[in-house]
Every structure is written in C-alpha cells, then in structure tokens.
C-alpha cells in the first residue's frame, strides 16, 4: 500500500497499518488491546496528577508539612 501509515502496537511493538482494514488500531489485535486495558484497570498505567492547595497554586511536596 503506497502512502499508508504504520504504527507500532503499544503492547507488542508489531507494525500495524493505520487503515480501516485494521479494526484494533493502534493495537495489532484484540488480545493486545485487552492486555493494555488490563494494565489501565490494574493501575499499571496512570496519568499523573498534581494536587493543588486552596489557592490553586501547584502542590510543593517540600512545603507540605
């Protein structure tokens, strides 16, 4: 396929063509998609969060006494 884009599967690294023929993209298979979902559900993957004080300033762990 000339001009098609491929991306690595986030779970196993296998190249995946970014087309309608790849229903699990960016994953190579439903198995890899479910493995990734399980990581999120077990909190193996997390989006970090910075707590804020009452004034909305960024939280400084050195000042939290």
Image (cartoon, helix red, strand yellow):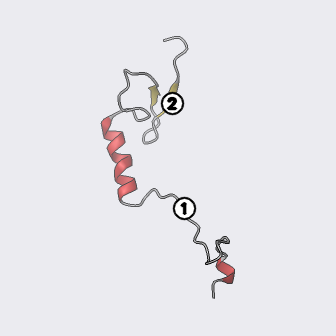
Name the side, left or right, on which 37 lies relative to 10.
Answer: left
How many residues crowd around disc 2 within 10 Å: few (fewer than 14), some, or many (20 or more)? Answer: some
Name the side, left or right, on which 64 lies relative to 34.
Answer: right
Residue on which the image places disc 1 = 48
Residue found 64% across the figure and 74% down from its top? 59
How many residues crowd around disc 1 within 10 Å: few (fewer than 14), some, or many (20 or more)? Answer: few
Residue found 38% across the figure and 25% down from its top? 22
Name the side, left or right, on which 57 lies relative to 8.
Answer: right
Q: Position of residue 38 (x, y in %)?
A: 34, 52
33 up-or-down from 64: above or below: above
Dot 1: element = loop
Q: Position of residue 54 (x, y in %)?
A: 61, 78
- Going from N to C along the chain, the mark reached first, 1 or 2, is 2
Residue found at the far top of this picture: 2
Residue found at the far front of this picture: 55
For the C terminus, the quadrant is: bottom right
Residue found 39% across the figure and 22% down from its top? 20
Q: Position of residue 64 (x, y in %)?
A: 63, 83
Q: Position of residue 28 (x, y in %)?
A: 39, 32
Residue 15 marker: none
- In terms of image quadrants, where is residue 60? bottom right
Mark nearer the viewer, 1 or 2: 1
Residue found 36% across the figure and 40% down from its top? 32
Dot 2: element = strand
Marks 1 and 2 sit apart, C-alpha to C-alpha, by: 25 Å
Residue on which the image places disc 2 = 7
Residue in front for this viewpoint, 31 or 26: 26
């Amino acid at each position: 396929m000339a001009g098609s884009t491929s991306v690595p599967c986030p779970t196993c690294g296998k190249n995946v063509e970014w087309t309608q023929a790849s229903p699990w993209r960016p994953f190579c298979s439903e198995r890899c998609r479910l493995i990734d979902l399980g990581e999120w559900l077990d909190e193996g993957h997390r989006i970090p969060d910075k707590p804020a004080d009452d004034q909305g300033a960024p939280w400084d762990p050195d000042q939290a006494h």
